[in-house]
Amino acid sequence: MRLATTLNKPLNSYQDKILRRSRCFGEIFHFIKVFAKHKSKTKNQRPKTKFMKNFRELIESDGIYVFDGAMGTRLYEKGIYINRSYDELNLIAKDLVREVHEEYVKAGAEIIQTNTFSANYNKLQQFGLDSQLREINLSAVRIAREAADDKVFVAGTIGPLGLRIEPYGPTSFEEAKTMFKQQAEALLEGGIDLFVLETFSDLSEIQQAINAVKEISDLPVVAQIAIQMDGNTVFGATPEIFTKRLEDWGADVIGLNCSVGPALFLTALEKMREVTTKKLSAQPNAGLPRDVQGRQMYMCSPEYMAEFSRRFIQVGASFIGGCCGTTPAHIKLLSDAIRSVSPRQTAQVFIKQPATVKELKPEDVSVIPLAERSNWGNKIANGKFVTSVEVLPPKGCDAEKTLASIKLLKDAGVDAVNVPDGPRAQTRMSAQATSVLIEREIGIEAVLHYCCRDRNLLGMMSDLLGAAALDLRNLLIITGDPPKMGPYPDATAVFDIDAIGLTNMVNRLNHGLDLGNNPIGKPTSFSIGVGVNPGAVNLEEEIKRFEWKVEAGAEYAITQPVFDTEQLRSFLDKISHVRIPIIAGIWPLVSFRNAEFLHNEVPGVNVTQEILERMRKASEISKEAARDEGIAIARESLSEVRDVIAGVQVSAPFGNVKYALQVFDVLDEFKARRETANVS
């Protein structure tokens, strides 16, 4: 029976019995083999090679040492498919995992890593294995110890959690640290010699991993970052920056692993060496994978990897191994190459003293006060009532009619135009492009709605920097409606982060930092607005998210359409402890059908029974009567909450801004401006 078949298909009771028996015999056979090997050594009295029991001795020595290669690559080659948990194999296929370790020891590896890259709570939970976290990690260490046979070091491997942590995700730093600590405690209990934190891209995440390990152990920590084709992390952190950060956080060895091949590693290692005196490590992939007849193949030969290992030594790397695509054949030639260059001597490398690294933090960056960012921000900062109208971008590429209607708003004295970003997953002109046209052609400020649905982190960063360069200053940050709500339900939704994470990103841009905490030079000057829903079904969760948005840097909020004014007042009381200026969304209804739709099909919008009844009666009279009744209801709603809000956003029904302007008549200051401008 092939092991791959056993692992991927359900077993009947007879097959299960045979498999368990075969595993038992396999373990007995392995014990006999180890015992015989030990007896042979004792009998022949061969001197044992001196083995440093403390990994810190290696770090403090002048030697070059060899890590192992890819565990997953070898398991896949042995028939274990990628649709299962490789960490579970530590419990159900111990011999197979041990066999891979032994291959690398035989090839010359002096440090082998446990098969625990994904053995954390979050990733194991996806396979229903979270309750076996401790057993999986303990077993992994035992298996590696058996293969090491007191000849090589065993490193406890910890990888990323597989979720986003603050400031760009819902998982807090403390929660992340707790999950890392849970795995680290199990590895430590198993008896590892060191920790290897590998394949991290988010510096905030690896910081929590280091903190977790440091809180429970004084074992050495090797911290390794995954870089992209440009030599930086996916979040844009340069080698100089992440090296210095890892050193500050207490990593004993700083390195790179995974993602790309040896050539890009070489350039990054050169930059890393310039800013640290810490020992460096390098475990590249065997190049980038290529599609060969439907299979992803790593094309770097063992000879090529061996040649680059010599170059790694020349730029100061002390610990060298391999990641995805590397095999015992790669490690064998790599090990031979290292010993041929210098059996146990490091290359003489000139170290630049990292006295100052200007890129590590913005210098002379002053955050622009809200009152100085825009007219909109100035009025909010100074407690003046703001008025705005929401106008949808045009459906095509001709914005002439939209701009003509917006000119009426400027003439009437409205402070700003709110430009939605693909509301209800509809396809319209870019909200950013529309906002630029509005400000340049009409001369009224735009409040750009910006959602997380359509763009990944890199796209968002590019958009926001572009918006700043185009002098767009006012943002309303929202998560965005899912595509299934619109005419293209099969469109892909990205949602790399939600509105909380995006608020964090924009706030950092205002402080001169990108999403990887790297300086961008001149800071942006966005007025940061967020959405809030007083009528949320789960009000407790809505308030919690609002608290996080304020903590992330929100400076004002705009509500969902308000039809229940008592509900809004009650909500404002509940958020008084984190109160920022609240702008009420007011939506003039145009018909009973419109009211029914909003009440029943738009999440978070609550149209009271009284208003529904008023709209029903008016709609029975005529369309005009229904429209007038809707405007009257909107005026009443605005009047009832005027004393507790910082401004109002009125939606223009069907793009008709004249109806929106009529709502403002209840505002004395606005009415005076309208009369002066003679706008009907």
Image (cartoon, rainbow, N blue to C red):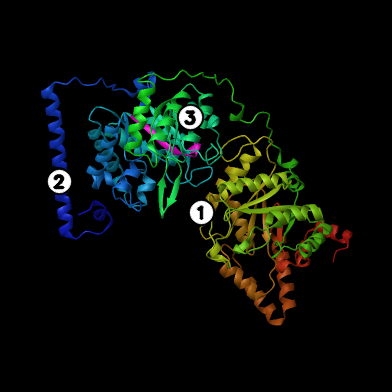
Residue 217 visible, this orientation: no
* 85 vs 666, nearest the viewer: 85
Q: Is residue 248 above or below residue 574?
A: above
Magenta range is 194-204
What residue sits 75% from the left and 47% below the top?
A: 379
Distance between the Cα atoms at labels 1 and 3? 38 Å
- The mark found on residue 246 in the picture is 3
**Circle 2 SS class:** helix
What residue sits 36% from the left and 19% below the top?
A: 344
Q: Identify the amino acid type marked 1.
A: Glu
Circles 1 and 3 in contact, beta carbons < 8 Å = no
Q: Residues within 10 Å of mark 2 (few under 14, many from 20)?
A: few
Along the horizontal axis of the image, is 290 left or right of 25? right
- The mark found on residue 24 in the picture is 2
Q: Position of residue 665 (x, y in %)?
A: 79, 63
Q: State which quarter of the image contains the C terminus.
A: bottom right
Q: Residues within 10 Å of mark 3 (few under 14, many from 20)?
A: many
Q: Position of residue 51 (x, y in %)?
A: 27, 22
Direction bottom: furthest residue:
621
Q: Which residue is mark 1?
A: 540
Q: Identify the amino acid type marked 2.
A: Cys
Q: Nearer the viewer, mark 1 or mark 3?
A: 3
Along the horizontal axis of the image, is 129 left or right of 617? left
**Circle 1 SS class:** helix
Q: Identify the amino acid type marked 3.
A: Leu
Specify the quadrant of the image occupied by residue 598: bottom right
Q: State which quarter of the image contains the N terminus.
A: bottom left
Q: Is residue 293 above or below residue 656?
A: above
Mark before the other along the chain sequence, 2 or 1: 2
